Amino acid sequence: MGRYNVPALERAINILDLISNSKERYSVTEICSKLDLPKATVFTTMSTLEHYNLVQKDQVGKFQIGPKMFQLGMNYTSNNSIVDLAKPYMKKLMEKTGFTVHLGVLHEDHIMYIAKEEPDNFIKFSTYPGLKTEVHLSGLGKAISAFLGEEELDQIIKNVGLKGVTSKTITSAKQFKDSLEVVRKDGFAIEDEEGEIGVRCVAAPIINTRYITPTAISITAHSSQLLNDQFAEMGELVRYTAQEIARNI
């Protein structure tokens, strides 16, 4: 806790964190329960956040992230040099594979998507810059985790856990670490329906000693489009793209 922390601002940030990190919408009462805050305090805070379009209230009185938050997130990505540099390579990889391409970083023990290139086809993924997910649920997370120090990885697992969301999710720390050995050997990571049934990812880390934020690039596709026998070929394409970006940071 900082010496000069502002409690009202702190509460607003905690509320925004709660809403932005969940697919659910929350009412004032639910926010009070989740964060152990007085109802009057939450009501006043939400009214202010809603006034500035940082949150939006639906017809039943539940809140979701508002357009101002999206604008702030887009401002971050547009001013982020790694995004500017990576965009041409992401587009080229998208055109070569026909798959959606993501760029992500490690942020507060989670993977945060910071850029996306999407082909013009009927399969769309509900990812966006600013979205956060656990490290074990995405190819980006695996690619980044494989090259973290053991102490840092252990701390992330301790803080966040390895919750199961599909029958294929790795929920054992030992099994997760064993899978990272394969990532280090191959130079790319495979996420096979571990975060969502029907979705597969292939990712590679972007490693450059001058750019210290752990970063990775991935392709995402429906399991009917990205088959097992394509993993090696796609992995090499993604790994090569990651290396090209790293050389030019």
Image: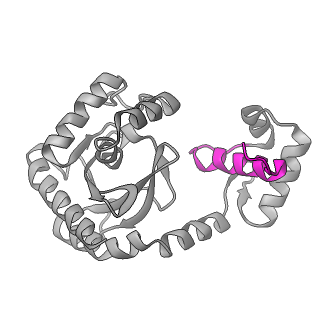
Residue, x 20% and y 49% (percent of image)? 188
Residue 85 sits in quarter: bottom left
| Residue 27 picture location, percent across and down | 76, 43
Give left or right: position of 6 versus 107. right
The answer to whether residue 2 is magenta is yes
187 or 238, nearer to the observer? 187
Give left or right: position of 6 versus 132. right
Observer able to see residue 219: no
222 or 235, nearer to the observer? 235
Observer able to see residue 59: yes
> Looking at the figure, which quarter contains the C terminus?
bottom left
| Residue 48 picture location, percent across and down | 83, 59
Give left or right: position of 122 versus 60. left
Residue, x 20% and y 59% (percent of image)? 238
244 or 212, nearer to the observer? 212
> Looking at the figure, which quarter contains the N terminus?
top right
Give left or right: position of 170 versus 43. left
Residue, x 50% and y 54% (percent of image)? 131
| Residue 205 picture location, percent across and down | 27, 53
| Residue 219 picture location, percent across and down | 26, 57
Over which residues does the magenta segment extend?
Answer: 1-26
The answer to whether residue 217 is magenta is no
**Quick check: 171 above or below 61?**
above
Residue, x 70% and y 43% (percent of image)? 26
